[in-house]
Amino acid sequence: MDDLRTRYLGEIAGAADEVALERLRVAALGKKGEVSLRMRELGGMTPEERQVAGPALNGLKDEINAAIAAKKAALEDAALDARLKEEWLDVTLPGRRRARGSVHPVSQVTEEVTAVLADMGFAVAEGPQIESDWYNFDALNIPDHHPARTEMDTFYMAQAEGDNRPPHVLRTHTSPVQIRAMQERGAPLRVICPGRVYRADYDQTHTPMFHQVEGIAIDRDISMANLKWVLEEFFSAFFGTTVKTRFRASHFPFTEPSAEVDIQCSWEGGTVKVGQGDGWLEVLGSGMVHPKVLEAGGIDSSKWQGFAFGIGIDRLAMLKYGIPDLRAFFDSDLRWLRHYGFAPLDVPTLHGGLQ
Ligand code: PHE
């Protein structure tokens, strides 16, 4: 018994892992274990012998069980220590940064333009980018064979032979949304319509898709004077400095009279600065809405009149943020986007100075 005790307690103390411990438990206390076999021999002993051997064997059994449990706990502690040593975490490290996108200058400027004009009472309207030629041309007093149809380098939607739906185009300007707004809202009316427009053109200042914002104000006695005030207020708020405008007589089929509007700028040092100097830069088309256009929009031209204007948003973005090439706007070059993009939480507001 003493031999058994010494051997088992020694081996248990030296066991390397739980598997070895379990093997020792079976060898001593399993059905055919050495201690169990001894216990079975108790039956063949005299009562006197049994009285000595019985408690001694039970004591040994308890001792071995206790030693195994203690060793098991010690092994578990050691394993946990080892794991803790390996899997440590420095909670004082700075967090990992997530890549954050930026707001494209076109989106930013659209928001800015909208913030300024909404403050003047213009509501925002939107229309489809694929328009019937009626909305894009006829309703705007651009009849068939009118030179403006070809001047606008229109993209026509493919039309299968025998398809007798009216021809559709990618809208060449936001002016068709004027018509839809008049039809839907009637007079009096004050809306702006920002959105994408399309023309087959491509160079440093032209891309086949670009952005305009249309403005229209209809009431009983609206005049060119109101147009001029609105535009000067708009440009001054948008550029954050007083901006003079120059109206040049022009021609659009949908306005009469019509004016192209230039804003004051200087060209010194090879960069354009808006609101100073004695140079001029053309930025928009405008005029008094043609009576035929009012009628196409379902508005009685003997009672109502008003102005409309169309500005290139991309152009404004290039001017305000000093971006030289329009084509880069649509290249999706991440370096460009990171350089010219805006922080996503930097929402333009009038009280925030727009930037
Ligand atoms: N639709 C014109 C263009 O795209 C701009 C414009 C809008 C002119 C409204 C006059 C009035 O060139």
Image: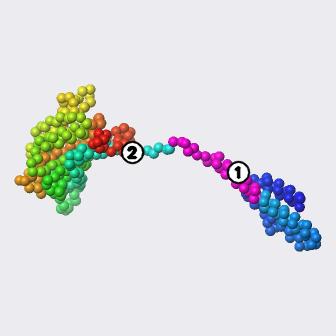
Looking at the image, which is closer to me, 293 or 29?
29
Q: What residue does disc 2 label?
A: 101
Residue 240 placement (x, y as % from top left): 25, 36
Q: Residue at x 11, y 47 (%)?
A: 222
Circle 2 packing at 10 Å, graded few (<14), some (14-19), many (20+), is few
Query: Hey, what amino acid is under mark 2?
Result: Gly
Q: What residue does disc 1 label?
A: 78
Residue 48 placement (x, y as % from top left): 94, 70
Residue 119 placement (x, y as % from top left): 23, 46
Q: Quadrant of the C terminus?
A: top left
Q: Residue furthest left?
A: 302
Circle 1 packing at 10 Å, graded few (<14), some (14-19), many (20+), is few
Q: Dot 1: what SS? A: helix
Q: Residue at x 30, y 45 (%)?
A: 107
Whether residue 91 is in magenta: the answer is yes
Distance CA(mark 2)–CA(mark 1): 47 Å
Q: Is mark 1 within 8 Å of ligand 1?
A: no
Looking at the image, which is closer to me, 291 or 333?
291
Left or right of 336, for residue 221: left
First to last magenta residue range: 68-94
Q: Residue furthest top?
A: 269
Circle nearer the viewer, 2 or 1: 1
Left or right of 133, for residue 54: right
Query: Hey, what amino acid is under mark 1?
Result: Ala
